[in-house]
Image (spheres, helix red, strand yellow):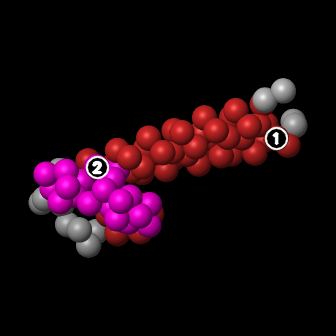
Amino acid sequence: MDPVVAIVRLVGYLIRVLTWVIIVDAILTWFPQIDRRHPVVVTLRKITEPIYRPIRRLVPPERTGYIDLSPLIAIVLLQILWMVVVSLAFRR
């Protein structure tokens, strides 16, 4: 297998996994009865918060009617990153 293809597949896999982690984390915020100290929730937060933090600095929830758009923006940015990786890897 071509090393470029292997790297692109790995990056694609990581982006898909990270996207699903963000989606699950966002959905969990809809359920206030979930214990925020549960190990799964803590692990999800440790993964997603470093991604959300710079986005929240640029688009604070106070500007959007206290709706946190950082998960949505993070997913859009990940998809853009995927398109850039693929286009750079396979351009001729």
Instruction: State the mark number for residue 20.
Output: none
Instruction: State the mark number for residue 4.
Output: 1
Crowding around mark 2 (Cα neighbors within 10 Å: few <14, some 14 to 19, many 20+) is: some
What segment carries the magenta color? 49-71
Quadrant position of residue 43 = bottom left
The amino acid type of the residue labelled 2 equals Leu
Considering the numbered disc 1 on the image, is that residue within a helix, a strand or a loop?
Answer: helix
Magenta stretch, main secondary structure, is: helix
Q: Is 4 on the left or on the right of 59, as rendered? A: right
Instruction: Give the alpha-carbon distance from disc 1 to disc 2, as whole Å.
Output: 34 Å
Quadrant position of residue 88 = top right
View extreme (right): residue: 2
Considering the numbered disc 2 on the image, is that residue within a helix, a strand or a loop?
Answer: loop
Marks 1/2 in contact by CB < 8 Å: the verdict is no
Q: Position of residue 20 (x, y in %)?
A: 43, 45
The amino acid type of the residue labelled 1 equals Val
Asked whether residue 11 appears in the rendered view, the answer is yes
Compared with 43, 28 (above or below) is above
Task: Identify the residue position indicated by label 2 in the image.
Answer: 69
Q: Is residue 90 magenta?
A: no
Q: Which quadrant holds the N terminus?
A: top right
